[in-house]
């Protein structure tokens, strides 16, 4: 599993916040299979439903 081979490669916040780039690439845009490239949505498009769960998530410890 990738989590075992590179546990610091990809943190939670870098995964769900398009303004936080992965150390090696931007995540500001995405391309789904069969679609054109588009802007990545905050919290993967579920911000209205789950943003309250992460209200205090500002620590850089969660970035990578």
Image (cartoon, rainbow, N blue to C red):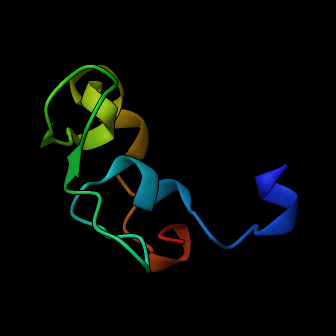
Residue 34 is drawn in which quadrant? top left
Residue 37 is drawn in which quadrant? top left
| Residue shown at the point (30%, 19%) measured from the top left | 49
In the image shown, does 20 or 5 lie closer to the viewer? 5
| Residue at the far front in the pictured view | 34
Q: Looking at the image, is 49 positioned above or below residue 47?
A: above
Count of numbered circles in the view: 0
| Residue shown at the point (30%, 53%) measured from the top left | 17
| Residue shown at the point (30%, 28%) measured from the top left | 32
Q: Looking at the image, is 16 positioned above or below residue 53?
A: below
In the image shown, does 20 or 24 lie closer to the viewer? 24
Q: Position of residue 19 (x, y in %)?
A: 21, 63
In the image shown, does 44 or 57 lie closer to the viewer? 44
Horizontal side of residue 49 vs 10, given as left or right: left
Quadrant of the frame with the C terminus? bottom right
| Residue shown at the point (21%, 23%) measured from the top left | 48
Q: Position of residue 25 (x, y in %)?
A: 35, 71
Horizontal side of residue 51 vs 29, given as left or right: right
Horizontal side of residue 9 vs 31, given as left or right: right
Horizontal side of residue 42 vs 12, given as left or right: left
Residue 46 is drawn in which quadrant? top left
């Amino acid at each position: 599993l990738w989590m075992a081979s590179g546990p610091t490669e990809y943190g939670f916040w870098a995964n769900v916040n398009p303004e936080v780039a992965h150390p090696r690439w931007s995540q500001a845009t995405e391309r789904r299979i069969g679609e054109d490239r588009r802007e990545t949505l905050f919290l993967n498009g579920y911000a209205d439903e789950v943003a309250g769960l992460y209200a205090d998530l500002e620590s850089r410890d969660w970035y990578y």
